Image (cartoon, grey):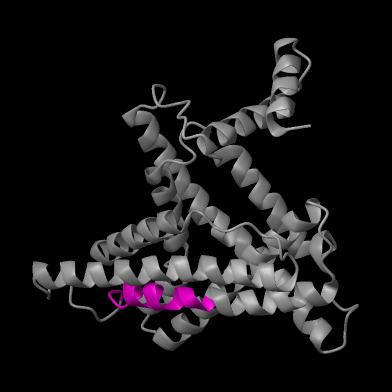
Amino acid sequence: MSEMSDLERRYSLFEQGLLDEEAVNRLRQDVFDEASRRDIDLFEEQRTPSGQLYEMGKGAARGFLGSFATLGEGLGEQADAITNLLGAEDLIDSGEENELVRISREAQESIQERLGADVAYRDQWLTKFGEGAGSFASFLVPGGALKALNLPKTALGVTAAQAGGIGAGEQAQRIEAAREQGIEVTPGQEDAAIFASTAVGWTELLPVQRALRFISKSADPAFKKGIANRIKSALTTGGIEGVQEVTASILQDAVERGVYNENLPLNESLMDDFTVGGAVGAFADLAL
């Protein structure tokens, strides 16, 4: 059965009132995805400036909270991969049997239920910017606090652990999605992917450290730099963050394709990754 035939069948069931709420939401999303592939904007006339501002705010909260949920999942999977490498396979469980992973996934589901983007705004640039800004801000909580306490080395270590954990968590989510599609991922492949993606996560350190350099307990509150220098710095940080986002996306794809899913489709969102990442980096540099 073709994809359009399946959509038509489900739409017919919808008209007859035979779909539950979950099936209706899934149908709505699938219709939106099919329209997007055909360059048809179904919601152009429904979007409003106030609605976009609201969704951008939700995106910021979703990105901030979701980063910590992803971190928890990544730390759980890292611990399992490390003990497996040391020969203690039964010491720490993986997947849903790992309590930290299970709690983190439930937290992620709760965040999506309460703060998930409305389908009309989901692919809008400002929505993605809000989520990216929230995600970036999550690094400023532990790292920024430690930097403000004049503990730069501790801040760097904590930020590195956070970045690596989030990188591992993102790959763990990819592995879970692949398994749901029926792709077999062996424990060895899972561990290899988790280790590789931990290193991918460390690419986040450069733009974050550039932003954190303005936070210091002994910093003079006076504006030390001229406007031209601040703009130059913001553009530099923005460029670094944009390149980092694209690089991390490509590397995460490479890990997935090279380890357990050779049929992974090409990533078509790299331009959005660059522009959103660049804007977030520049904004963070100026704001701090």
Q: In the displayed structure, would residue 46 be above or below residue 283?
A: above
Report the label total. 0
Left or right relative to 269: residue 187 = right
Which image quadrant: the C terminus? bottom left
- The residue depicted at 73 percent of the width and 15 percent of the height is 12
Please state the extent of the stretch shown in magenta in the rendering.
Answer: 202-215
Left or right relative to 241: residue 266 = right
Residue 67 lies in the magenta-colored region: no
Q: In x, y percent, where is residue 190?
A: 77, 72
Q: Residue furthest right?
A: 90
Front residue of 205/277: it is 277
Residue 118 visible, this angle: no
Front residue of 70/36: it is 36
Q: In x, y percent, where is residue 215?
A: 31, 74
Q: In the displayed structure, would residue 2 be above or below residue 98?
A: above
Residue 252 visible, this angle: yes
Q: In the displayed structure, would residue 216 be above or below residue 114?
A: below
